[in-house]
Amino acid sequence: MSDQTISPPTDYAALLGDIKLRVRHAQTRAMLAVNAELIRLYWDIGALIHSRQQQQGWGAAVIPRLARDLHNELPEEKGFSERNIKRMLAFYREYADLEFVPQPVAQIEAGSPLAPEKVPHAAALFSAELILALPWGHHAELMSKVKDPATRQWYMRTAFENGWSRNILLMQIETAAHRRQGKTASNFTLRLPKPDSDLVQQTLKDPYLFDFLTLESGFHERELETGLIAHLEKFLLELGQGFAFVGRQYHIDIGDQDFYIDLLFYHLKLRCYVVIELKRGDFKPEYAGKMSFYCSVVDDQLRHETDKPTIGLILCQQPNRLLAEYALRGVDNPIGVSGFELTRALPETLQTSLPSIEQIESELGGFEQ
Protein backbone atom coordinates (compact mmCIF):
# COMPACT_ATOMS: atom_id res chain seq x y z
CA MET A 1 0.00 0.00 0.00
CA SER A 2 1.31 3.43 -0.91
CA ASP A 3 2.18 5.68 2.05
CA GLN A 4 0.08 8.37 0.36
CA THR A 5 -3.08 6.40 1.14
CA ILE A 6 -2.28 6.11 4.83
CA SER A 7 -3.87 8.80 6.98
CA PRO A 8 -1.27 10.77 8.93
CA PRO A 9 -1.32 10.80 12.73
CA THR A 10 -3.34 13.52 14.41
CA ASP A 11 -0.22 15.44 15.44
CA TYR A 12 1.51 15.09 12.05
CA ALA A 13 0.88 18.71 11.00
CA ALA A 14 2.47 19.97 14.21
CA LEU A 15 5.49 17.70 13.65
CA LEU A 16 5.91 18.93 10.07
CA GLY A 17 5.64 22.56 11.18
CA ASP A 18 8.19 22.02 13.96
CA ILE A 19 10.70 20.43 11.58
CA LYS A 20 10.28 23.23 9.02
CA LEU A 21 10.85 25.82 11.74
CA ARG A 22 14.01 24.04 12.93
CA VAL A 23 15.34 23.82 9.36
CA ARG A 24 14.80 27.54 8.83
CA HIS A 25 16.52 28.36 12.12
CA ALA A 26 19.46 26.14 11.19
CA GLN A 27 19.73 27.84 7.79
CA THR A 28 19.67 31.23 9.47
CA ARG A 29 22.39 30.25 11.93
CA ALA A 30 24.50 28.85 9.08
CA MET A 31 24.23 32.07 7.08
CA LEU A 32 25.07 34.17 10.12
CA ALA A 33 28.07 31.97 10.89
CA VAL A 34 29.39 32.21 7.31
CA ASN A 35 28.93 35.99 7.31
CA ALA A 36 30.65 36.29 10.70
CA GLU A 37 33.68 34.35 9.46
CA LEU A 38 33.95 36.60 6.41
CA ILE A 39 33.80 39.74 8.57
CA ARG A 40 36.45 38.30 10.93
CA LEU A 41 38.67 37.46 7.95
CA TYR A 42 38.44 40.98 6.52
CA TRP A 43 39.13 42.48 9.95
CA ASP A 44 42.18 40.23 10.35
CA ILE A 45 43.53 41.17 6.92
CA GLY A 46 43.05 44.84 7.73
CA ALA A 47 44.88 44.29 11.03
CA LEU A 48 47.83 42.59 9.29
CA ILE A 49 48.23 45.40 6.77
CA HIS A 50 47.89 48.06 9.47
CA SER A 51 50.53 46.32 11.60
CA ARG A 52 53.00 46.20 8.71
CA GLN A 53 52.42 49.83 7.94
CA GLN A 54 52.95 50.85 11.54
CA GLN A 55 55.93 48.61 12.33
CA GLN A 56 57.76 48.53 9.01
CA GLY A 57 56.66 51.74 7.38
CA TRP A 58 54.85 50.16 4.44
CA GLY A 59 53.00 52.68 2.32
CA ALA A 60 49.69 52.50 0.47
CA ALA A 61 51.46 51.30 -2.68
CA VAL A 62 51.62 47.76 -1.30
CA ILE A 63 47.85 47.34 -1.60
CA PRO A 64 47.62 47.33 -5.45
CA ARG A 65 50.43 44.77 -5.58
CA LEU A 66 48.78 42.68 -2.88
CA ALA A 67 45.52 42.70 -4.85
CA ARG A 68 47.29 41.52 -8.01
CA ASP A 69 49.24 38.77 -6.23
CA LEU A 70 46.19 37.48 -4.37
CA HIS A 71 44.30 37.33 -7.65
CA ASN A 72 47.13 35.33 -9.22
CA GLU A 73 47.67 33.03 -6.23
CA LEU A 74 43.98 32.54 -5.39
CA PRO A 75 42.10 33.12 -8.67
CA GLU A 76 39.01 31.31 -7.42
CA GLU A 77 38.59 33.67 -4.46
CA LYS A 78 36.54 36.83 -4.89
CA GLY A 79 36.55 40.01 -2.83
CA PHE A 80 40.25 40.85 -2.91
CA SER A 81 40.24 43.78 -5.30
CA GLU A 82 42.38 46.81 -4.50
CA ARG A 83 39.28 48.74 -3.50
CA ASN A 84 38.02 46.03 -1.17
CA ILE A 85 41.42 45.53 0.49
CA LYS A 86 41.48 49.26 1.22
CA ARG A 87 38.05 48.82 2.79
CA MET A 88 39.41 46.01 4.97
CA LEU A 89 42.16 48.30 6.23
CA ALA A 90 39.63 51.06 6.91
CA PHE A 91 37.33 48.53 8.59
CA TYR A 92 40.05 47.44 11.01
CA ARG A 93 40.93 51.03 11.84
CA GLU A 94 37.29 51.86 12.52
CA TYR A 95 36.83 48.93 14.91
CA ALA A 96 40.37 48.16 16.08
CA ASP A 97 39.36 47.89 19.75
CA LEU A 98 36.71 45.21 19.26
CA GLU A 99 37.35 41.61 20.27
CA PHE A 100 35.76 39.12 17.93
CA VAL A 101 35.15 36.05 20.07
CA PRO A 102 34.41 32.73 18.30
CA GLN A 103 30.92 32.35 16.85
CA PRO A 104 29.11 35.10 18.80
CA VAL A 105 26.25 35.35 16.32
CA ALA A 106 25.15 31.76 16.81
CA GLN A 107 22.73 33.05 19.46
CA ILE A 108 21.25 35.77 17.22
CA GLU A 109 18.24 34.98 15.08
CA ALA A 110 17.71 37.12 11.96
CA GLY A 111 15.29 39.96 12.63
CA SER A 112 15.36 39.59 16.40
CA PRO A 113 16.14 42.70 18.49
CA LEU A 114 19.57 42.97 20.06
CA ALA A 115 18.46 43.73 23.59
CA PRO A 116 21.22 45.20 25.80
CA GLU A 117 20.88 42.42 28.35
CA LYS A 118 21.62 39.87 25.59
CA VAL A 119 24.73 41.63 24.26
CA PRO A 120 27.89 41.35 26.39
CA HIS A 121 29.47 44.41 24.79
CA ALA A 122 26.33 46.59 24.86
CA ALA A 123 28.08 49.19 27.03
CA ALA A 124 30.31 50.05 24.07
CA LEU A 125 28.97 52.05 21.16
CA PHE A 126 29.69 49.18 18.77
CA SER A 127 29.38 45.54 19.78
CA ALA A 128 31.25 42.71 18.10
CA GLU A 129 27.98 40.79 17.89
CA LEU A 130 26.29 43.55 15.91
CA ILE A 131 29.31 44.06 13.63
CA LEU A 132 29.41 40.35 12.80
CA ALA A 133 25.67 40.14 12.18
CA LEU A 134 25.68 42.64 9.27
CA PRO A 135 26.83 41.77 5.73
CA TRP A 136 30.08 43.23 4.40
CA GLY A 137 28.24 45.36 1.83
CA HIS A 138 26.37 47.11 4.64
CA HIS A 139 29.64 47.92 6.41
CA ALA A 140 31.17 49.30 3.22
CA GLU A 141 28.26 51.72 2.75
CA LEU A 142 28.14 52.70 6.43
CA MET A 143 31.87 53.50 6.55
CA SER A 144 31.57 55.54 3.37
CA LYS A 145 28.38 57.47 4.11
CA VAL A 146 27.93 57.67 7.89
CA LYS A 147 30.92 59.19 9.68
CA ASP A 148 29.36 60.01 13.05
CA PRO A 149 29.78 56.92 15.29
CA ALA A 150 26.49 57.29 17.16
CA THR A 151 24.55 57.74 13.91
CA ARG A 152 26.29 54.76 12.34
CA GLN A 153 25.47 52.61 15.34
CA TRP A 154 21.79 53.60 14.98
CA TYR A 155 21.75 52.50 11.34
CA MET A 156 23.57 49.26 12.18
CA ARG A 157 21.12 48.29 14.88
CA THR A 158 18.04 49.38 12.92
CA ALA A 159 19.22 47.63 9.74
CA PHE A 160 19.69 44.38 11.65
CA GLU A 161 16.43 44.56 13.57
CA ASN A 162 14.44 45.39 10.41
CA GLY A 163 16.32 43.09 8.06
CA TRP A 164 17.18 45.93 5.66
CA SER A 165 18.85 45.00 2.40
CA ARG A 166 21.81 47.07 1.22
CA ASN A 167 19.60 49.12 -1.11
CA ILE A 168 17.06 49.84 1.62
CA LEU A 169 19.87 50.82 3.99
CA LEU A 170 21.17 53.29 1.39
CA MET A 171 17.69 54.73 0.91
CA GLN A 172 17.25 55.18 4.67
CA ILE A 173 20.63 56.94 4.92
CA GLU A 174 19.84 59.23 2.00
CA THR A 175 16.52 60.25 3.58
CA ALA A 176 18.15 60.81 7.01
CA ALA A 177 15.89 58.30 8.74
CA HIS A 178 17.76 58.71 12.05
CA ARG A 179 16.73 62.37 12.26
CA ARG A 180 13.05 61.61 11.67
CA GLN A 181 12.57 58.68 14.03
CA GLY A 182 10.75 59.49 17.25
CA LYS A 183 10.00 63.12 16.28
CA THR A 184 6.21 62.84 16.11
CA ALA A 185 4.26 65.39 18.17
CA SER A 186 2.15 63.28 20.51
CA ASN A 187 0.48 62.75 23.88
CA PHE A 188 1.95 59.25 24.30
CA THR A 189 3.74 60.06 27.56
CA LEU A 190 0.42 61.26 29.03
CA ARG A 191 -1.77 58.42 27.75
CA LEU A 192 0.47 55.34 27.72
CA PRO A 193 2.51 53.73 30.52
CA LYS A 194 6.26 53.34 30.21
CA PRO A 195 7.92 51.67 28.40
CA ASP A 196 4.98 51.49 25.95
CA SER A 197 4.98 55.26 25.45
CA ASP A 198 8.67 55.29 24.53
CA LEU A 199 8.29 52.32 22.20
CA VAL A 200 5.36 53.89 20.35
CA GLN A 201 7.16 57.23 20.09
CA GLN A 202 10.24 55.60 18.56
CA THR A 203 8.08 53.59 16.15
CA LEU A 204 6.72 56.74 14.48
CA LYS A 205 8.65 59.44 12.64
CA ASP A 206 8.32 63.00 11.39
CA PRO A 207 8.17 63.76 8.54
CA TYR A 208 7.20 60.79 6.42
CA LEU A 209 8.57 60.87 2.88
CA PHE A 210 6.25 59.87 0.06
CA ASP A 211 8.58 60.81 -2.78
CA PHE A 212 7.49 57.69 -4.67
CA LEU A 213 4.21 59.51 -5.44
CA THR A 214 3.69 61.88 -8.36
CA LEU A 215 0.90 64.28 -7.41
CA GLU A 216 0.15 67.78 -8.61
CA SER A 217 0.29 70.57 -6.02
CA GLY A 218 -3.50 70.81 -5.81
CA PHE A 219 -4.07 67.13 -5.08
CA HIS A 220 -7.04 65.90 -3.08
CA GLU A 221 -6.74 63.76 0.04
CA ARG A 222 -8.40 60.84 -1.74
CA GLU A 223 -5.72 61.00 -4.48
CA LEU A 224 -3.02 60.81 -1.82
CA GLU A 225 -4.75 57.85 -0.22
CA THR A 226 -5.13 56.07 -3.58
CA GLY A 227 -1.47 56.67 -4.40
CA LEU A 228 -0.26 55.26 -1.09
CA ILE A 229 -2.30 52.09 -1.52
CA ALA A 230 -1.15 51.73 -5.13
CA HIS A 231 2.42 51.81 -3.81
CA LEU A 232 1.62 49.84 -0.67
CA GLU A 233 4.99 48.09 -0.46
CA LYS A 234 6.89 51.40 -0.52
CA PHE A 235 4.38 52.94 1.87
CA LEU A 236 4.86 50.09 4.36
CA LEU A 237 8.63 50.44 4.03
CA GLU A 238 8.40 54.13 4.91
CA LEU A 239 6.07 53.42 7.84
CA GLY A 240 8.59 50.92 9.21
CA GLN A 241 8.65 47.31 10.31
CA GLY A 242 5.59 45.83 11.97
CA PHE A 243 2.76 47.61 10.12
CA ALA A 244 0.18 45.20 8.65
CA PHE A 245 -2.42 46.72 6.32
CA VAL A 246 -6.02 46.12 7.39
CA GLY A 247 -8.07 48.34 5.11
CA ARG A 248 -8.66 51.59 3.26
CA GLN A 249 -11.82 53.64 3.90
CA TYR A 250 -12.53 51.12 6.63
CA HIS A 251 -16.24 51.20 7.42
CA ILE A 252 -17.47 51.62 10.97
CA ASP A 253 -21.13 51.79 11.85
CA ILE A 254 -22.28 53.89 14.81
CA GLY A 255 -26.02 53.68 15.25
CA ASP A 256 -27.60 54.85 12.02
CA GLN A 257 -24.46 56.65 10.80
CA ASP A 258 -21.61 55.40 8.66
CA PHE A 259 -18.02 56.50 9.12
CA TYR A 260 -14.90 55.63 7.12
CA ILE A 261 -11.33 55.52 8.42
CA ASP A 262 -8.80 56.60 5.79
CA LEU A 263 -6.28 53.84 6.55
CA LEU A 264 -6.32 51.14 9.22
CA PHE A 265 -3.27 49.10 10.20
CA TYR A 266 -2.35 46.60 12.89
CA HIS A 267 1.14 46.82 14.35
CA LEU A 268 2.59 43.39 15.04
CA LYS A 269 5.21 44.53 17.56
CA LEU A 270 3.12 47.11 19.39
CA ARG A 271 0.17 44.69 19.38
CA CYS A 272 -2.39 47.37 18.63
CA TYR A 273 -4.44 48.91 15.83
CA VAL A 274 -3.13 52.08 14.21
CA VAL A 275 -5.60 54.52 12.66
CA ILE A 276 -4.10 56.87 10.04
CA GLU A 277 -5.91 59.96 8.77
CA LEU A 278 -4.51 61.93 5.81
CA LYS A 279 -4.92 65.72 5.69
CA ARG A 280 -3.86 68.29 3.13
CA GLY A 281 -2.45 71.56 4.39
CA ASP A 282 -2.06 72.69 8.00
CA PHE A 283 -2.93 70.75 11.13
CA LYS A 284 -6.22 71.86 12.72
CA PRO A 285 -7.19 71.23 16.36
CA GLU A 286 -10.49 69.60 15.36
CA TYR A 287 -8.56 66.78 13.70
CA ALA A 288 -7.59 65.52 17.16
CA GLY A 289 -11.21 65.15 18.26
CA LYS A 290 -12.20 63.18 15.17
CA MET A 291 -9.16 60.91 15.52
CA SER A 292 -9.98 60.29 19.19
CA PHE A 293 -13.47 59.27 18.13
CA TYR A 294 -12.09 56.77 15.60
CA CYS A 295 -9.67 55.30 18.14
CA SER A 296 -12.47 54.80 20.66
CA VAL A 297 -14.65 53.04 18.10
CA VAL A 298 -11.82 50.73 17.00
CA ASP A 299 -11.11 49.94 20.65
CA ASP A 300 -14.77 48.99 21.19
CA GLN A 301 -15.46 47.15 17.93
CA LEU A 302 -12.13 45.60 16.83
CA ARG A 303 -9.69 45.52 19.70
CA HIS A 304 -9.10 42.10 21.25
CA GLU A 305 -8.79 41.87 25.02
CA THR A 306 -5.05 41.14 24.66
CA ASP A 307 -4.46 44.12 22.33
CA LYS A 308 -3.06 47.38 23.59
CA PRO A 309 -4.92 50.70 23.12
CA THR A 310 -5.43 51.84 19.55
CA ILE A 311 -3.05 54.55 18.37
CA GLY A 312 -4.00 57.40 16.06
CA LEU A 313 -1.60 59.02 13.60
CA ILE A 314 -2.61 62.21 11.80
CA LEU A 315 -0.53 62.94 8.71
CA CYS A 316 -0.70 66.48 7.34
CA GLN A 317 1.51 68.64 5.17
CA GLN A 318 2.26 71.41 7.66
CA PRO A 319 1.97 70.16 11.23
CA ASN A 320 2.23 73.04 13.70
CA ARG A 321 3.96 71.23 16.56
CA LEU A 322 2.89 73.63 19.30
CA LEU A 323 -0.71 73.66 18.10
CA ALA A 324 -0.72 69.86 17.91
CA GLU A 325 0.63 69.46 21.45
CA TYR A 326 -2.06 71.78 22.85
CA ALA A 327 -4.78 69.97 20.90
CA LEU A 328 -3.64 66.52 22.03
CA ARG A 329 -3.19 67.41 25.68
CA GLY A 330 -6.91 67.17 26.44
CA VAL A 331 -7.51 64.03 24.35
CA ASP A 332 -7.84 60.71 26.15
CA ASN A 333 -6.63 58.45 23.32
CA PRO A 334 -2.93 58.14 22.36
CA ILE A 335 -2.47 60.19 19.17
CA GLY A 336 0.51 61.47 17.21
CA VAL A 337 0.77 64.19 14.55
CA SER A 338 3.41 64.02 11.82
CA GLY A 339 4.06 65.76 8.56
CA PHE A 340 4.53 64.20 5.15
CA GLU A 341 6.53 65.35 2.16
CA LEU A 342 6.06 64.32 -1.44
CA THR A 343 9.57 65.47 -2.41
CA ARG A 344 12.49 66.57 -0.28
CA ALA A 345 13.97 70.01 -0.79
CA LEU A 346 17.35 69.96 -2.51
CA PRO A 347 20.39 71.02 -0.47
CA GLU A 348 21.35 74.65 -1.09
CA THR A 349 24.74 73.64 -2.50
CA LEU A 350 23.03 71.45 -5.08
CA GLN A 351 20.35 74.03 -5.82
CA THR A 352 22.95 76.62 -6.74
CA SER A 353 24.70 74.18 -9.08
CA LEU A 354 21.56 73.39 -11.08
CA PRO A 355 20.71 75.53 -14.14
CA SER A 356 17.58 77.66 -14.05
CA ILE A 357 14.70 77.25 -16.49
CA GLU A 358 15.88 80.39 -18.28
CA GLN A 359 19.39 78.99 -18.68
CA ILE A 360 18.05 75.71 -20.06
CA GLU A 361 15.81 77.52 -22.54
CA SER A 362 18.73 79.72 -23.58
CA GLU A 363 20.94 76.67 -24.17
CA LEU A 364 18.22 74.89 -26.15
CA GLY A 365 17.64 78.01 -28.20
CA GLY A 366 21.16 77.81 -29.57
CA PHE A 367 20.26 74.58 -31.39
CA GLU A 368 17.16 75.96 -33.09
CA GLN A 369 17.42 76.48 -36.82
Image: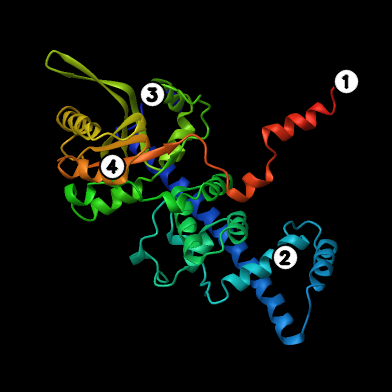
- Residue 154 falls left or right of residue 251: right
Q: Nearer the viewer, mark 1 or mark 4?
A: 1
Q: Secondary structure at mark 4?
A: strand
Q: Secondary structure at mark 2?
A: helix
Location of the C terminus (image quadrant): top right
Locate residue 320, reporting x and y percent: 32, 42
Comes first in the chain, label 2 or label 1: 2
CA separation, marks 2 and 1? 54 Å
With respect to residue 221, does 276 lie above or below? below
User: Which residue in the structure is indicated by mark 4?
Assistant: 336
User: Which residue in the structure is indicated by mark 3?
Assistant: 221
At label 1, the amino acid type is Gln
Locate residue 284, reporting x and y percent: 27, 34
Q: Nearer the viewer, mark 1 or mark 3?
A: 1
CA separation, marks 1 and 4? 59 Å
Comes first in the chain, label 1 or label 3: 3
Locate residue 333, reporting x and y percent: 18, 39
At label 2, the amino acid type is Ile
